[in-house]
Image: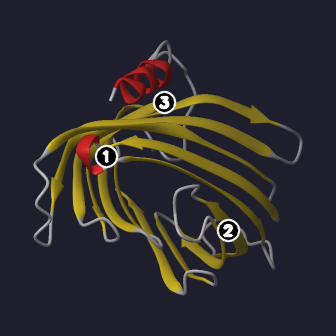
Amino acid sequence: MMRGLALLLLVTSGLIGQPTLARPVSYAGGWTVVEESDRQSSSLLVHYSPASNWSIGPRVEVNRDADYALYSINPTWLAKRWFGSDYQANLYLHAGAGLAAGINQNPLEDDFAIQGGVMADWETRSLFVGYRSRYLDAGRFGDQFSHAARLGFAPYVGDTGDLHTWLMLEIDHRPEAKDTVTAAPVVRLFKGPLLLEAGYNLTAKQPLFNFTYRF
């Protein structure tokens, strides 16, 4: 548990003053709904952006492999954004704290849970590189580290308001999982405030689905 507490302090220290707009954060006063599903868990996050550089909101995650659920409050910050003549890059930090509770007759008692990690991306109008990591300490339910990288390209370049399509490959690494490294092709579609992702984990033989909508 102390490792998790130290991680949260590291992630949160000195970050609430950054001035730029983060895409995972939305505009000041905006709401975002994020659903994610992967080879291990499914989650739903609803966050509000008090300012254009950070957001906060409740998150529910169900770990299907270990039969427990996480109920947490999750802040996200934009740490840095870079602009080039034809590219944009971003660095985000995310954290969370809350309760881990057993489901499906899991006999373990509820416990405090804490998590944190990094998200980063670099993209042009036709190329994308992304990375995400997370460390989770769920008390008696155990701790875990996971990270994933994505490479993608757009088969066409659309204008503002068009339907945009990205074809991606995600490589996921979870050192404590049965399949430590997996690969999943992903199709990303977005138009206006709506983003959809669908894919299939070739190693774990499980579907992947993500949904984001901004208000």
Q: Which mark is residue 53?
A: 3
Label 1: which residue? 47
Dividing the image into 4 quarters, which one contains the C terminus? bottom left
Viewer-side label of 1, 2: 2
- Tell me residue 108's x, y (percent): 14, 54
Residue 181 visible in the current orientation: yes
In the image, residue 7 above or below residue 87:
above
Amino acid type, label 3 = Asn
Q: Position of residue 22 (x, y in %)?
A: 54, 39
Q: At 49% across and 47% down in the image, what residue appears?
A: 24
* Residue 144 position (above or below residue 83): below
Residue at the image point whose x is 30% and y is 44% from the top: 138
| Vertical order, 85 against 212 (above or below) | above
Instruction: Give the residue number, with chain letter if any, for mark 2.
Output: 170
Q: Is residue 163 something that shows in the picture?
A: no
Q: Quadrant of residue 30?
A: top left
Viewer-proximal residue, 64 or 155? 64
Q: CA distance from mark 2 to mark 3?
A: 27 Å
